[in-house]
């Protein structure tokens, strides 16, 4: 009797492993296909970039000049770039042009998200922005977007002056193992997003922003990444704050601190 129970338990365990292995990208990538109208963009001070017909994201309208350069924001795993307009509100006041990059499979763009697809598309976006706007060029990654940014800078030839990593992890297999300790999760992950390795050769400034009580990306993963960085770096940690509670109101001083650090 006992061996039958063990056998059924093993079969159930292996079945769950197979489901997780096959469906993990549907668990990791949570896109919305919402695409805003021209009226909505005008109300929010945004425009399709580079054009409405072949858009790769949105560009914020200049509010205080753009003398400090251009920053491209690569957002997290849910929603769309349009939902991150708070970056435009916060960053453009310091003289930076803000591009909100959109991923394939998100916001009505064609494609199926994966590490390879998102990183290759990010490289194309960065190269296009560089040709259009020139230097200095900065990258901002938000959670999943940190993996996209790190993967892009490890391959791209375009000069990137600075990077901001907002709620990053070290490697996705390590993060998966923390959350799913009862599975051999590290060995099941398709998309590695190894930020430690991908940032190893980067020579620009890196700002890292973490949440102390982050339940999505536990803070030890961000600390491990920060400690591995070999270039000029600075760390911000929001105390007693979870993943979705980091304060992003445009008037908060930490925005200016981060901008001042990466642009100096």
Image (tube, rainbow, N blue to C red):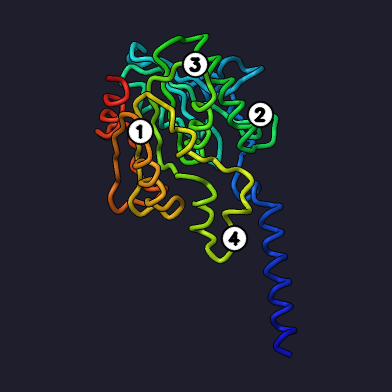
> Relative to 243, does residue 92 appear above or below in the rendering?
above
Q: Nearer the viewer, mark 4 or mark 1?
A: 1
Choose the circle earlier in sequence order: 4 or 2: 2
Choose the circle earlier in sequence order: 2 or 1: 2
Quadrant of the snapshot with the C terminus: top left
Element under disc 1: loop
The answer to whether the residue labelled 3 contacts the one labelled 4, judged by CB atoms less than 8 Å apart, is no
Q: Nearer the viewer, mark 2 or mark 1?
A: 1
Residue at left 41%, top 11%? 135
Residue at left 40%, top 38%? 166
Element under disc 2: loop
The answer to whether the residue labelled 2 contacts the one labelled 1, judged by CB atoms less than 8 Å apart, is no
**Which residue is under mark 4?**
184
The answer to whether the residue labelled 1 contacts the one labelled 3, judged by CB atoms less than 8 Å apart, is no
**Which residue is under mark 3?**
158
Mark 3: few, some, or many residues within 10 Å (few <14, many ≥20)?
A: some
**Which residue is under mark 1?**
230
Front residue of 66/24: it is: 24
Choose the circle earlier in sequence order: 2 or 3: 2
Report, in whole angstroms, how far the alpha carbon at label 2 lies from the one at label 3.
24 Å
Q: Which mark is residue 109?
A: 2
Report, in whole angstroms, how far the alpha carbon at label 3 lies from the one at label 4.
38 Å
Report, in whole angstroms, how far the alpha carbon at label 4 lies from the one at label 2.
34 Å
């Amino acid at each position: 009797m006992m061996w039958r129970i063990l056998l059924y338990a093993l079969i159930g365990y292996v079945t769950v492993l197979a489901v997780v292995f096959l469906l993990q990208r549907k668990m990791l990538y949570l896109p919305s296909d919402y695409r805003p109208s021209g009226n909505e963009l005008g109300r929010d001070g945004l425009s399709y970039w580079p054009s409405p017909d072949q858009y790769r994201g949105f560009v914020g309208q200049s509010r205080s000049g753009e003398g400090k350069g251009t920053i491209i924001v690569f957002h997290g795993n849910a929603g769309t770039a349009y939902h991150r307009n708070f970056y435009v509100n916060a960053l453009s006041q310091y003289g930076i042009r803000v591009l909100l990059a959109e991923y394939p499979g998100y916001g009505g763009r064609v494609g199926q998200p994966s590490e390879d697809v998102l990183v290759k598309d990010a490289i194309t976006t960065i190269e296009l922005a560089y040709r259009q706007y020139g230097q200095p060029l900065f990258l901002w990654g938000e959670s999943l977007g940190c993996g996209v940014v790190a993967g892009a800078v490890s391959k791209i030839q375009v000069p990137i002056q600075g990077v901001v990593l907002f709620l990053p992890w070290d490697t996705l297999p390590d993060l998966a193992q923390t959350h799913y300790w009862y599975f051999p999760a590290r060995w099941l992950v398709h998309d590695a997003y190894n930020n430690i390795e991908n940032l190893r050769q980067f020579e620009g400034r890196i700002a890292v922003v973490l949440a102390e009580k982050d339940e999505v990306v536990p803070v030890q993963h961000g600390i491990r990444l920060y400690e591995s960085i070999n270039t000029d770096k600075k760390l911000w940690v929001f105390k007693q704050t979870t993943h979705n509670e980091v304060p992003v109101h445009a008037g908060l001083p930490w925005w200016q601190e981060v901008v001042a650090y990466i642009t100096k």
